[in-house]
Each structure stands twice: as structure tokens, then as C-alpha cells.
């Protein structure tokens, strides 16, 4: 299983592992990208020398780290260069905080709209609210009539849902057509509404199971046994999937409404 930068507290181990996983010539290409001679690179990765912070930024750009990962790498380098126990302790605390933040899905998914407690209770009371909001991003579903037909629900209910979405700014109306007002909302892991939100969409997934289209849709259930040490590794892998999915979906043109539980199905 591939390890990620937040699994490391030693930047040399991370970069050495990256070089080992990226075929022959990776050290040469890294040398060319950073302007650091291959011999010096080897001395840094295997000895007591360290990258400067400026060189670290070039390394990050070459490896194509995200901004939050670059910041973490810089802290690791600062730790390697630290000349006192006091400074090392401060940096190690920062490392632990960054690792903890990275494990939180809330910090890994874009947040944009803060709803009041009452608005959240309504929005997450039924899957239809999130489904209707999502459908407004698809060109052919700019009107309530098309949404009601696609979802198989009474148009009067769709109108009530849309009234709420427009009132809260989750949707907007432009030139007689409905559009998403914000990119997404997100519930914290400790929210009392989380269980209801997950339950609503899992019920919807079970309704879809008998007619899943194998070319596009997927349902996966796998009770399993594994070591205690691998439990966190699997959770990290799933968190990576959520993050990478979010990165794909963000810029992707809105054409169909799907749901990931992990059941991957078209909503209709």
C-alpha cells in the first residue's frame, strides 16, 4: 500500500521512497528540477546535510505536492535542520497537529456554506434536498418539472424543497433557470445529523441495488479481518479516495447525478 507524506516524520525517508517508486532516472530528474547536483542530493538523503527551504519548495513542485502537503514537507525539513531540543519539540507538535488535521475528512473536503442549526435539520432530513440541489448543476434539470420526473416524486414536494434551497442561498435562479448557489455543504463527524444523512442515502442505495448498471455503477460489501496496525492504513486509503474523488468532481462538467456511499449509483 502506497504511503503518503503525512505518514512520515522524516522528510528524507519520504523523498527516498518517492524516488524508489518512480522508476529509474527519478534522482536525475529531481536533480535537474531543483538545481541540486546528484552527488549533493545523495549526500542530503543519506547523510547529515539538509535541503534549504528554497530547495524544498522546488522538490515539492517537482513531486507535485498539494499546498497543504508542501507546508507539511517544509515543517519536516525545519525539524531536520533544528539546532535545539526546544525548537524540535515545537516542530514535532506542529507535525502531530498537521497529521491529525489530515485525518479529519472535514479538513479534506471543500466547505463553502454554513447553515444554521434549524436549516441543517431540514436540509439533512431527506435525501431529496441534496439530490435536488445537485440536479440544478445539470443543464437539463433547470426546472422543477424535469427534477420531479427524474426523481419520481410529486412536483409539489420539489417546489417546497426548491423554496428552501433558494431561501438559504444553496440554490439561485438566473434567467428563469435554477443553479447551485454554493459548491457543497458538509457535516462534521460529531454532528447529530450525520447518522440521518448517511441512513437516508443508504436506503436510497438499497432501492437501487436490484437494477444496478454494471458498466457505470458499483456496490461493494466486504466483511473482513485484518491486523490492528492495518486498520488505520485502510482508513487512510478510504480517506484518500474521498479526497481524490472530490478533486475529480470539482472541475468535472455536471452531466449526471451519482452518489458514493461506498455504493456508486445513479440517482433516479
Image (cartoon, rainbow, N blue to C red):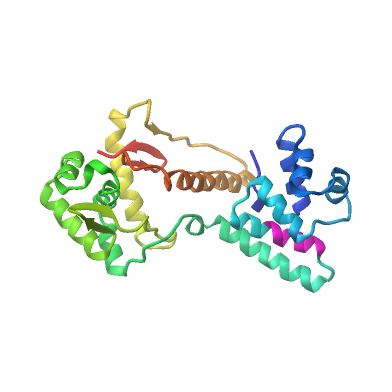
Q: Is residue 255 above or below residue 58?
A: above
Q: Is residue 150 above or below residue 10?
A: above
* Nearest to the observer: residue 226 or residue 42: 42
On the image, which quarter does residue 255 sit in?
Answer: top left
Q: Which residues are magenta?
A: 73-81
Q: Position of residue 109 (x, y in %)?
A: 47, 55
Tell me which residue sits at (50%, 48%) in the image: 243
Q: Position of residue 97 (x, y in %)?
A: 62, 64
> In the rendered view of the protein, which quadrant contains the C terminus?
top left
User: Taking 91 as reference, is 146 left or right?
Assistant: left
User: Taking 175 as reference, is 50 left or right?
Assistant: right
On the image, which quarter does residue 145 sit in?
Answer: top left
Q: Position of residue 91 (x, y in %)?
A: 72, 67
Answer whether residue 218 is magenta in the image: no
> In the rendered view of the protein, which quadrant contains the N terminus?
top right
Q: Position of residue 54 (x, y in %)?
A: 74, 59
Amino acid at each position: 500500500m502506497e504511503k503518503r507524506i503525512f505518514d512520515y516524520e522524516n522528510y528524507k525517508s519520504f523523498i527516498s521512497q518517492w524516488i524508489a517508486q518512480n522508476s529509474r532516472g527519478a534522482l536525475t530528474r529531481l536533480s535537474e528540477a531543483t538545481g541540486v547536483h546528484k552527488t549533493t542530493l545523495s549526500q542530503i538523503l543519506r547523510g547529515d546535510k539538509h535541503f534549504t527551504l528554497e530547495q524544498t519548495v522546488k522538490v515539492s513542485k517537482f513531486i507535485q505536492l498539494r499546498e497543504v502537503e508542501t507546508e507539511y514537507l517544509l515543517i519536516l525539513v525545519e525539524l531536520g535542520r533544528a539546532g535545539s531540543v526546544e525548537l524540535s519539540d515545537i516542530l514535532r507538535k506542529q507535525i502531530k497537529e498537521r497529521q491529525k488535521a489530515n485525518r479529519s475528512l472535514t479538513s479534506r473536503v471543500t466547505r463553502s456554506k454554513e447553515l444554521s442549526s434549524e436549516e441543517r435539520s431540514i436540509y439533512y432530513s431527506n435525501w431529496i434536498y441534496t439530490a435536488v440541489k445537485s440536479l440544478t448543476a445539470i443543464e437539463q434539470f433547470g426546472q422543477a418539472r424535469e427534477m420531479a420526473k427524474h426523481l419520481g416524486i410529486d412536483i409539489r414536494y420539489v417546489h417546497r424543497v426548491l423554496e428552501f434551497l433558494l431561501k438559504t442561498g444553496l440554490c439561485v435562479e438566473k434567467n428563469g433557470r435554477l443553479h447551485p448557489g454554493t459548491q457543497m455543504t458538509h457535516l462534521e463527524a460529531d454532528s447529530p445529523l450525520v447518522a440521518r444523512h448517511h441512513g437516508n442515502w443508504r436506503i436510497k442505495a438499497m432501492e437501487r441495488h436490484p437494477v444496478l448498471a454494471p458498466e457505470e455503477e458499483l456496490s461493494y460489501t466486504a466483511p473482513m479481518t485484518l491486523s490492528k496496525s492495518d486498520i488505520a492504513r485502510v482508513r487512510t486509503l478510504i480517506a484518500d479516495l474521498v479526497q481524490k474523488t472530490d478533486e475529480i468532481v470539482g472541475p468535472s462538467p455536471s452531466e449526471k447525478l451519482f452518489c458514493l456511499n461506498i455504493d456508486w449509483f445513479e440517482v433516479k
